[in-house]
Amino acid sequence: MKKTLLVLVVLMVAMTTLFANGGTEAAATDKEWAPEQPITIMNHVKVGGAMDLYSRKWVEIAAKYTDATFVVDNNSGASGLTAGEWVLNQEADGYTVFALAPTYLDAVIQAELDCAEYVDGFEYIYNLMADPYCVLVPATSEFKTFEDLVNWAKAGNLITLAEPNYGAKYIDAVQVFGAVGVETKTITYEGAKNVFAALLGGQTIASVGNPGDTVKYEVRALAIGNPTKVAGLEDVPNYKELGYDEALDHISMWRGYAVKKGTPAGMITWFQNLCDQVSADPEWIEYMTANKLTVLTDKTDAFTKTVVDEVVSTIDILKAVDQISADYKYN
């Protein structure tokens, strides 16, 4: 009997030790994840596109804080859909990161793809930046202020807008000019260069773009949808200052990182911590400011809300203008 009792005690101690060690190992795996091979950052834009440039700069600065190797890749096919699909087809092992912006979501919606797969198939882990939308006119335009443009439209004239597609900038135009109460007509062009060639060539009156466009092209911003002033454009009013709905100052283009759902929690924590370090780096802040961007540090919960809100509002607006089927919906 004593021998049997001794054996049971030994077994219980052994099992307790086994489970304790297993728990410790699992915790280490979750909290102390470290890459053992290169991590691919897949961009939804071509080489030289905005997110491509920003992610390459991010990798350069991240090298100050980690020995991890990052490989920046690009797949801009089908407006970025091929990049998203490629990421979804990879293992959720932590070695693939998706660098995206609202344009990817726009492509999903306009193609009326299944949001459960192409939107909810990702975990949105870090929103890096905000790039406000603004109303742009040629530098030589007769319209000196936003109110000049609005009053001209209210006098019976039609504001024509040059935009790359019925995507994020078009959505902002619908929201802004709808709130103001004037009619617009959007003419789409392939790519930013063609958009601004049309605007500067007099084919349209205005365009909804971003503050950085004022550096790249001979254009002026009449209004910027941002709650705070943008460096170098301090004299340009936001919508609250113009007397319109303050909510218009909180609609902006964002750019950030996502991973395939099911990616190890330890990797996500490791990557978010690295993003925090880069976002606080003076070189990154200076780079963002020079490009008239606002540094963000939104993690999973906040970033996911931003994405879902964007998807829902985009679907509603595109339905209203008959650009997608009436029965298409987000889950």
Image (cartoon, rainbow, N blue to C red):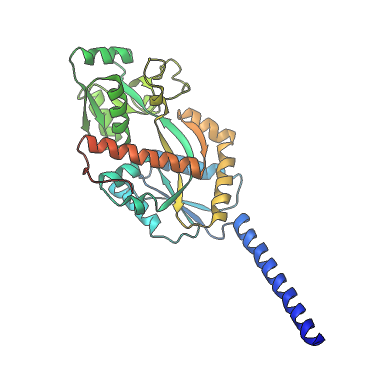
**At 30% from the left edge and 52% from the top edge, which residue is drawn?**
114
Quick one: 142 or 253, which is closer to the camera?
253
Give left or right: position of 331 versus 283: left
Vertical position of residue 116 compared to residue 157: above or below:
below
Q: Position of residue 328 (x, y in %)?
A: 25, 46
**Which quadrant of the structure image shows residue 33?**
bottom right
**At 40% from the left edge and 26% from the top edge, which residue is drawn?**
247
Give left or right: position of 35 versus 326: right
The quadrant the N terminus occupies is bottom right
Vertical position of residue 50 compared to residue 81: above or below:
above
All told, the count of numbered labels is 0
Q: Position of residue 21 (x, y in %)?
A: 69, 67
**At 32% from the left edge and 50% from the top edge, which residue is drawn?**
81
Quick one: 43 or 272, which is closer to the camera?
272
Give left or right: position of 198 versus 244: left
Can residue 101 be seen in the rendering of this structure? no
Can residue 147 be seen in the rendering of this structure? yes
Vertical position of residue 37 compared to residue 17: above or below:
above
**Which quadrant of the structure image shows residue 144?**
top left
**At 40% from the left edge and 41% from the top edge, which residue is drawn?**
307
Residue at the outermost right position: 2
Q: Position of residue 119 (x, y in %)?
A: 37, 49
Quick one: 135 or 23, which is closer to the camera?
23
Residue at the outermost left position: 156
Residue at the outermost front position: 1
Q: Position of residue 44 (x, y in %)?
A: 37, 47
